[in-house]
Amino acid sequence: MTLPVAAGCAAPDQAAPLPAGLDLEKETVITGIVRSADDEPVPGAYVRLLDSTGEFTAEVVTSAAGQFRFFAAPGSWTLRALSRHGNGDTPVTAGRGVNEVAVTVA
């Protein structure tokens, strides 16, 4: 017997458009792409959001195009990408609105 998969159990689609009605004057979005040392998108990478003290806050898996997205508070963050191509860290100072970031793994 095959059981149905419960809706909402999968991670959100990292390539989906931002939600309608999102007020970018009040919200902080950290979004971007994980790329290999050869500048190719890295699908299936785990991207971790670490706070200013290095503490783990959240994690997402990149889309087929290597995209990721976090909704966070303004401030200093570190993005840590872990993948079969290697790992990489990128510091981010995020303000209100959309903050575009690239993370390279090697």
Image (cartoon, grey):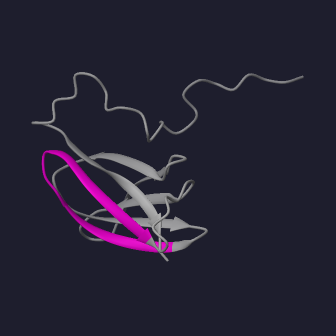
Using the image as rendered, state which of residue 24 and residue 74 is in the foreground. Answer: 24
| Residue that lies at the very extreme toward the bottom in this rendered image | 106
Using the image as rendered, state which of residue 67 and residue 3 is in the foreground. Answer: 67
* As drawn, 9 above or below 45: above
Figure disc tally: 0
Task: Report whether 60 appears left or right of 79.
Answer: right
- Name the quadrant containing residue 75: bottom left
- Name the quadrant containing residue 43: bottom right
- Name the quadrant containing residue 76: bottom left
For the N terminus, the quadrant is top right
Q: Looking at the picture, how far across and down is residue 61, in whole percent?
A: 51, 51
Q: Looking at the picture, how far across and down is residue 29, in whole percent?
A: 25, 45
* As drawn, 65 above or below 76: above
Q: Looking at the picture, how far across and down is residue 60, in whole percent?
A: 47, 50
By secondary structure, the bulk of the magenta-drawn segment is best described as: strand
Q: Residue at x 40, y 55 (%)?
A: 33
Using the image as rendered, state which of residue 90 and residue 7 is in the foreground. Answer: 90
Task: Report whether 96 appears left or right of 104.
Answer: left
Q: Residue at x 79, y 23 (%)?
A: 3
**Extent of the magenta region:** 87-104
Q: Residue at x 22, y 22 (%)?
A: 21
Is residue 15 covered in magenta?
A: no
Is residue 101 covered in magenta?
A: yes
| Residue that lies at the very extreme toward the left in this rendered image | 25
* As drawn, 14 above or below 79: above
Q: Residue at x 84, y 24 (%)?
A: 2
Task: Report whether 44 appears left or right of 53.
Answer: right
